[in-house]
Amino acid sequence: MRVLVIAESSERADIVRRGLMLAGHETANVAAADSPLPSALEQAKPDAIVLESHSPDIDLLDRIIDAMGERPLPLVIFSEDPSEQTISQAVRAGAAHRTVRRRGSCARRNARAVHP
């Protein structure tokens, strides 16, 4: 599976990229959270998107939705923000899964089921 990684920092992007490679997935590209996402999606032609963000804001999630356009993709979010508002925004953006990091551990939450 080709995955586009969107991250706030190159260090976090590298961690996600290495994890994807260990799981047998191809990292199609890595894009900074503040980069032009439509061109990143066009270049990468991913099968899924992984977003790594301390606290994904509505602007970033809206930019991801807009960049996907008529071709919605599975979206997985790694975040440190457990707030209900962030969860609602993630669901609105189409998140299939969201993982919240808490002091050295991870709590997983299914945002919603994805139907191909």
Image (spheres, rainbow, N blue to C red):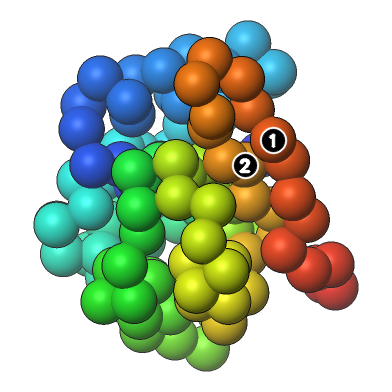
Residue drawn at point x = 63 percent, y = 50 percent: 98
**For the C terminus, which image quadrant?**
bottom right
Inter-mark Cα distance, 2 to 1: 6 Å
Q: Are marks 2 and 1 in contact (CB under 8 Å)?
A: yes
Quarter where residue 73 is shown: bottom right
Badge 2 marks a residue whose secondary structure is strand
The residue beneath circle 1 is 107
Give the x, y percent position of residue 32.
20, 46
Looking at marks 2 and 1 on the same chain, the residue that comes earlier in the sequence is marked by: 2
Label 1 packing within 10 angstroms: few (<14), some (14-19), many (20+) = few
Residue drawn at point x = 31 percent, y = 67 percent: 57
Residue drawn at point x = 51 percent, y = 61 percent: 83
State whether residue 90 appears in this view: no
80 relative position to 102: left or right = left
Q: What residue type is disc 1 on?
A: Ala
**Tag nearer the camera, 2 or 1:** 1
Quarter where residue 8 is shown: top left
* Residue situated in front as seen by the camera: 61 or 103: 103
Badge 1 marks a residue whose secondary structure is strand
Give the x, y percent position of residue 66.
36, 84
